[in-house]
Image (tube, rainbow, N blue to C red):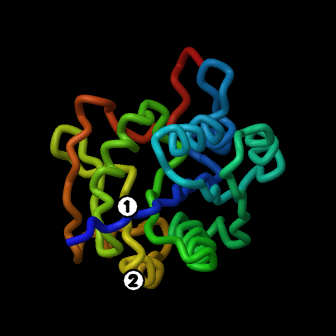
Amino acid sequence: MPTPDPLTVTGLLLAAGAGRRMGMPKALVSTDGVPWVRRAAEVLLDGGCAEVVVVLGAAEPEAREALADVEEGLTVIVCPTWERGMGESLRSGIAALQARSAQAALVHLVDLPDVGAAVVRRLLAAATGRDALARAAYDGVPGHPVLIGGDHLPGVAELAVGDSGAREYLRRHRPALVECGDLAGGRDVDRMPPDA
């Protein structure tokens, strides 16, 4: 029996929010001089995603500038309705993936600065087919990134509303958990540290 071709996974980076609790768009927050949007895009590429689609909204010109010299394989789109919540950004990103006939998506959030390429590589190992559905877990707690095979993308888009993103779809379909707590903490950062 022939071995199936490996699934081609496109990274989908959600970076459109205004970061109200942070006091600025999280895409523009920097660690060691590197804006989070750039770092997250490079993590997806370095981790093995074939290409990356970045969804921008708030501070789009500045975020786009932060990505200006990232290597090939990056596409930037703008979600015109980003203010309505992450669900809008996710739907915009999924529409872009479906337009390019993506086989699967690895959905990542811009506010996870400690999640590195090793986490992405571990999740991509779960990309076994268009019906794949898996998410990173940190000490057993589900988190991001989330691997969504192409068969699931329409359903995720249909249920993505407000700030819930893919939460309801994942609750109903129970993705496999891929433990990554040995690689990162996986917690989103909502507030600027006091010494920043």
Residue at (59, 66) in percent of width and height: 89
Q: Amino acid at mark 2?
A: Gly
Does 96 sit above or below residue 113?
below
Q: In this orientation, which residue lies closer to the viewer: 58 or 122?
A: 122
Mark 1 or mark 2, earlier in chain: 1
Q: In this orientation, which residue lies closer to the viewer: 18 or 76?
A: 76
Q: Position of residue 162 (x, y in %)?
A: 50, 72
Q: CA distance from mark 1 to mark 2?
A: 23 Å
Q: Position of residue 45 (x, y in %)?
A: 55, 44
* Element on which disc 2 rests: helix
Q: In this orientation, which residue lies closer to the viewer: 132 or 115?
A: 132
Residue extending farthest to the front is: 1
* Element on which disc 1 rests: loop
Of the 4 image quadrants, the one containing the N terminus is bottom left
Report the residue marked by disc 1: 6
Does 60 sit above or below residue 169?
above
Report the residue marked by disc 2: 155
The crowd level at tag 1 (other Cα within 10 Å; few <14, some 14-19, many 20+) is few
Residue at (73, 64) in percent of width and height: 78
Q: Position of residue 168 (x, y in %)?
A: 32, 74
Q: Is residue 135 left or right of residue 113?
A: left
Residue at (52, 71) in percent of width and height: 102
Picture quadrant of residue 95: bottom right
Q: In this orientation, which residue lies closer to the viewer: 72 or 151?
A: 72
Of the 4 image quadrants, the one containing the C terminus is top right
Q: Is residue 117 left or right of residue 127?
A: right
Closer to the observer: label 1 or label 2?
Answer: 1
Q: Amino acid at mark 1?
A: Pro
